[in-house]
Amino acid sequence: MTPPPHRRPSVTDVARVAGVSVGTVSNVLNRPDAVAPATRERVQAAIAELGFVRNGPARQLRRGAITTVGALLLDIRNPFFTDVARGIEDRLTVDDHTLMLASSDDDPAREAKYLHLFEEHGVLGLLVVPTSRSLEHLVEMQRRGVAVVLLDAPSTIAGMSSVSVDDEAGGELAAAHLLAQGHRRIVFLNGPHAIRQCEARRAGVDRAVRAAGLDPADVVEEVPLASLDAAGGDQALGGWVDAHDGATPDAVFCVNDLVAVGVQRHLRRRGGTDLLRRTAIVGYDDIEIAGELAVPLTSVRQPTHEMGYEATELLLRQAAGQPARHTVFQPELVVRASSTS
Amino acid sequence: MTPPPHRRPSVTDVARVAGVSVGTVSNVLNRPDAVAPATRERVQAAIAELGFVRNGPARQLRRGAITTVGALLLDIRNPFFTDVARGIEDRLTVDDHTLMLASSDDDPAREAKYLHLFEEHGVLGLLVVPTSRSLEHLVEMQRRGVAVVLLDAPSTIAGMSSVSVDDEAGGELAAAHLLAQGHRRIVFLNGPHAIRQCEARRAGVDRAVRAAGLDPADVVEEVPLASLDAAGGDQALGGWVDAHDGATPDAVFCVNDLVAVGVQRHLRRRGGTDLLRRTAIVGYDDIEIAGELAVPLTSVRQPTHEMGYEATELLLRQAAGQPARHTVFQPELVVRASSTS
DNA sequence: GTGAAAGCGCTAACAG
DNA sequence: CTGTTAGCGCTTTCAC
């Protein structure tokens, strides 16, 4: 049934069949023009006959040069990151490079595992959305010769490029909008402040509140999330409601759209579409389905595709020995029904 | 600024620093128990000092054996596929294998490119959701010694395992449900019949119609999609409406949930929530946000995670020389508001 | 328990 | 234009 595990043909085999030397086979593969047409055809025929496929690792071992880039994202199920990934791919395609993609799930152990894997593989460079805030291990890698670019996080490290979005501005946009709608109490479903984005968005929220002449302590109530997805949002809001004798908040700002989806789910389960409709909700990321939800979601949009593209651009530059650079994109508020009464 | 591109340290370097031979270094790396503790520590110190990281390709070249599996999915932005990917990863983790993930975007050129890349890399095996074209090239690969398992497509090939869902049953579930709701005309937004899933779902629809004593020609109107995503659904429905003097259909079955999202978007734009509410819509895949849409979406659920897990299981078996096997999962209808009046 | 040496498949440098 | 040959970094016999 299964054919005997027959060794894949090597250049030597091809050379033998074609009646030429391995050097010539290699030339056909890498510099076809430097080979006489007749010979070339003979070699190509042999390649086809044997079903020869180049051995990538051997090739890489010999050449040193590399065309693979590794990307380590936080959560591949989050549309925000898949859009970023698409931007990365699109830039790599230009140079005919390829992508190894992995998701850390915000788990430092997984992060470490994949970083190591990438390094062993000998990637040209790494695009990483860091989990923890300690960048020690990334600095180490860079010292060992692997170019590293931080994605969705500003670099504080000399020689390490980064692409990020001004998260403080994003938080400010969201809160200012809710305040402008007349809300004076905002429940902020946020992730741990160890995550820089979460901390920065909170700082932005506070800034907006102060700009309105109010005191954050009076206005903002931050609720921590167990996980930054729909389940986390659902649960966190539930906790808030339980702690308030069943009352629901008037205005909720969610640290991302998935969390907002969870909030909507919870509200609907608890008080139907009516309750949902009269609760102001703002999300973050503006994922594709944000406008298609039960109540279309107001959200802070980040230029995902561009971020991936730009980060890759910086990585390629950096790997080519050019100095590090930092790009900061500005977010944008997309207002929909969920926040306007 | 950027440090000189200093060659990464090799086992030879480690051996020199530790004052041992390369063989011993290799032993420390691969069979630590076979090395005297004192020596081992000396070597480990040298490894740490130099920041030595094993060269993966060289290792693979020498050993032959491989622990990487390639997966080629249709569209990494579709939650259906990311869930499948998670299933794959979970199974691979058990054996400490790793995943190379890529998305063909249903483009045969991209498919070919990645398949080739994987083969060059020397993967243990491949999990592939085939794009529309023939399986010839996959058979070829298998002949060359790369284990191949078809995902989301039943294999017709001897010796090639597959994991699929009974798509005909899925189409039947959806159509039978709409018929039971009293609808006698169903617009089916479908992809090209060159895609097996699309063809099978259509066959299932027809079967349900006939089972109800009706003639598919009277009941089912199939509209082809330009793309199997929200944009495609939006546009396809728009085309239908234009061709019907602005009338909108009563019942729509969409070949996947993303398409249904597009349909909802279109209806809402055209006639507000009212129109949306009185149109029956059934989707396919039951993606996570299906229940959170403007009108929660009735959908056909497929066991995504299990599919990925099982496919990987079959791949590993097959790579180990065991005979091919075929698993067919059954879909399930999840009824929500979008299809009930 | 450790060292010496061969070789995985390929490319590149050099000779002819 | 084509052939010969020397490694790339690693693992793995096989001696010692």
Image (cartoon, coloured by chain):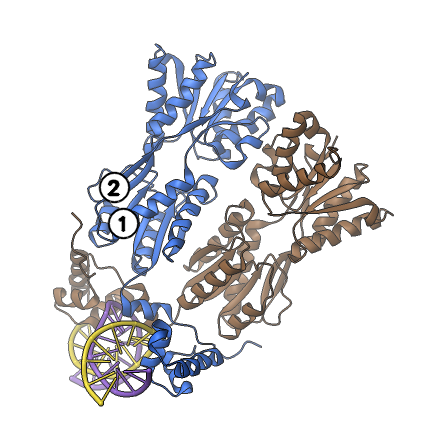
Chain colours: A blue, B brown, C yellow, D purple
Q: From what the image shows, is residue A210 above or below residue A129?
A: above
Is residue A273 shown left or right of residue A167? right
For label 1, the residue is A317
Is residue B53 shown left or right of residue A97? left
Q: From what the image shows, is residue A309 above or below residue B10?
A: above
Seen at 62% across and 70% down, the residue is B157
Judged from the image, the secondary structure of the residue bearing numbered disc 2 is loop
Tell me if mark 2 has few (under 14), some (14-19) or many (20+) residues whose alpha carbon lies within 10 angstroms of its own: some
For label 2, the residue is A325
Q: From what the image shows, is residue A175 above or below residue A53?
A: above
Where residue A126 sits: x, y (%)?
Answer: 31, 50
Disc marking residue A177? none
Q: Is residue A253 visible?
A: yes
Asked whether the beta carbons under mark 1 and mark 2 sit within 8 Å of each other, the answer is: yes
Tell me if mark 1 has few (under 14), some (14-19) or many (20+) residues whose alpha carbon lies within 10 angstroms of its own: some
Nearer the N terminus, badge 1 or badge 2?
1
Name the amino acid type tagged 1: Arg
Seen at 19% across and 42% down, the residue is A158
Q: Are marks 1 and 2 on the same chain?
A: yes
Nearer to the camera, C3 or B113: B113
Callout 2: residue from which chain?
Answer: A
Where residue B315 sits: x, y (%)?
Answer: 52, 64
Name the amino acid type tagged 2: Arg
Nearer to the camera, B103 or B21: B103
Is residue A197 shown left or right of residue B301? left
Where residue B334 sits: x, y (%)?
Answer: 67, 40
Quadrant of the rendered image containing residue B294: top right
